[in-house]
Amino acid sequence: MSLIIDQVDLSFGALQALKQVDFEVKDGELFGLIGPDGAGKSSLFRIMASLLIPDKGRCLMHGHDVVKDYRELRKIIGYMPGRFSLYMDLSVEENLAFYARVFGTNVKENYELIRDVYEQIAPFKKRLAGKLSGGMKQKLALSCALIHRPEVLILDEPTTGVDAVSRREFWDMLKKIQNEGITIVVSTPYMDEAEMCDRVGLIQKGKLLEITDPSKPYENDQAQLFSLKSEKGIYAYLDRIRNMEGCKQAWLFGDQLHVTLHSEEDATRVKAALDGWGDSSLEWLKITPSVEDRFMGLISNSEAL
Amino acid sequence: MDEREHIIEVKDMVKKFGSFTANDHLTFHVEKGEIFGFLGANGAGKTTAMRILCGLSYPTSGEIHVAGHDVYRERERIKRKIGYMSQKFSLYEDLTVSENIHLYAGIYGLRKKQIAAREDQLLERLGLTHVRNRLIREVPLGWKQKLAFSVAIFHQPAIVFLDEPTGGVDPITRRQFWEMIHDATEEGITVFVTTHYMDEAEYCDRVSIMVDGRIDALDTPAALKQQYESVNMNEVFLKLARS
């Protein structure tokens, strides 16, 4: 195991930031931690990076305890915090050289590992980091976190606020880094990024709700989940569906509604009712839940707030 | 839809910073009461355009009217007719829920009596009456974002500008937020919104996609998906912004 999180609790005063968080990450795995702001993602990542001490529980990385063996631990991890820790008054190449030296290496030694990422910003290597665009800062921060060839790469919300194209490119880069044998733990508030991970943990209000492999259908899945589509637009149908007997919840989902019913019998009844609505373009299909559906099923309406 | 009033009318808008052209001859309009999605990659020029439409910066050239007012000569009038909310800045953390409402409503020139009546209504509707005297920083993010939106439309503006309003909130709150947006349009408010969540682009009546300072596509989500042979708006966006 690359990483063992063992019953970790953390509080800030009255606020319980992490509640008995418990999971493991395998060697070479790309593990995603998905949840909204305030779920506890950054606190957990700071514990992994030995920057916060948990109130209870243990965290081991390649056998090193993050509290007792923090000196050893810091040599084998690369940590990219949400607010990039770059020196804004140093140039691009100075930042990289600085991080390499802090970790007792030089840029040349591991250049192959960062080549793909760094070459995209190399034309600006004389520019101060403070003068880079957000996307370029992100690439420089990733290069700096990788320059000592860590065994585990910890990335705290690297794609937040980044457009859909740059996000896709970033995940392509992560896949390549994973292929170099580096274990990656990454957090994100974007549910659609779950499918890029080998496994994901869903976290909300300090609690790990579930760990799942997005490529596999959910085992023992009892959910009666349906999608509703119409050429006339679906927003007008939202309240109508919610008020139907048997409807557990219904939400907008791209150009569809995703509707969860209580039972199979409800499905038959709802289908019959829809046929009577007089909209021939209605499409009602049973679907398998995506990670986002799953997440919404796990947090009840009131917990969402 | 053609007969609908154009609440925003932009003709040949150019904005240059030195030799850099941030907005390169933009021409488009927004119809009254619609949800208009303003998409584009980071650095495509969205924020620049939005600042001009909000009366915060002058264009280099072009003819632009917002809520019937000229962006060169009538910026103060524009500001009174719009609302604005972003994820990064919305409410004052060290003021209470109620103080934030009074502050914003006061800035927009509402009278005390009006404010009091609408405040009660608003808090009731959001289910936030019990936290009215709590500091904003103690209020969960989801509530905060919903409140920020309500405050941005508290003075019943003609248009509300939303700059990445749902960043970081959980998937259910995000959807509830969009239901609030729909409700606002039913009251006649026009919504101008940016987002990085491509499923949210589907909730808009029409969507424009900016690439390198230009608008490369503008249509309904359904028409864009058809035109770019894509199953969803994410694919449309990737095809346009990558090419």
Image (cartoon, coloured by chain):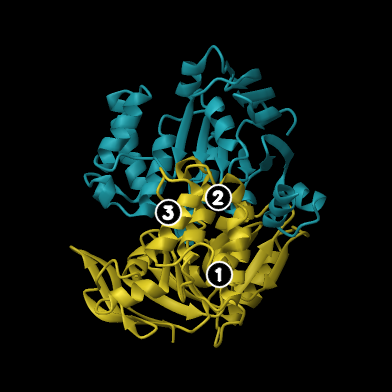
Q: Chain of mark 2?
A: A
The N terminus of chain B lies in quadrant: top right
Provide the letter of the chain coloured cyan. B
Q: Residue A174, labelled with which disc?
A: none
Q: Which residue is mark 3?
A: A84
Which badge, 2 or 1, is on the more N-terminal residue? 2
Q: Between disc 3 and disc 1, whose residue precedes?
A: 3
Q: Which residue is mark 1?
A: A194
Residue B239 visible: yes
Looking at this view, name the residue that lies furthest to the top: B73
Q: Nearer the viewer, residue A142 or B28?
A: A142
User: Is label 3 on the same chain as label 2?
Assistant: yes
Mark 2 residue crowding within 10 angstroms, few (<14) / some (14–19) / many (20+): many
Q: Which residue type carries mark 1?
A: Ala
Name the residue type under label 2.
Gly
Hue of chain A? Answer: yellow
Q: CA distance from mark 3 to mark 1?
A: 22 Å
So how many labels did they put on this image?
A: 3
Query: With respect to residue B6, does A46 lie above or below?
Result: below
Q: Quarter of the image holding residue B115? A: top left
Q: Amino acid at mark 3?
A: Phe
Q: Earlier in the sequence, mark 3 or mark 2?
A: 3
**Residue on which disc 2 sits:** A135
- Taking depth in this image into account, of B113 and B243 the one nearest to the observer is B243
Alpha carbon separation for disc pair 2 and 1: 21 Å
Q: Nearer the viewer, residue A113 or A240?
A: A113
Q: Position of residue A47 (x, y in %)?
A: 31, 70
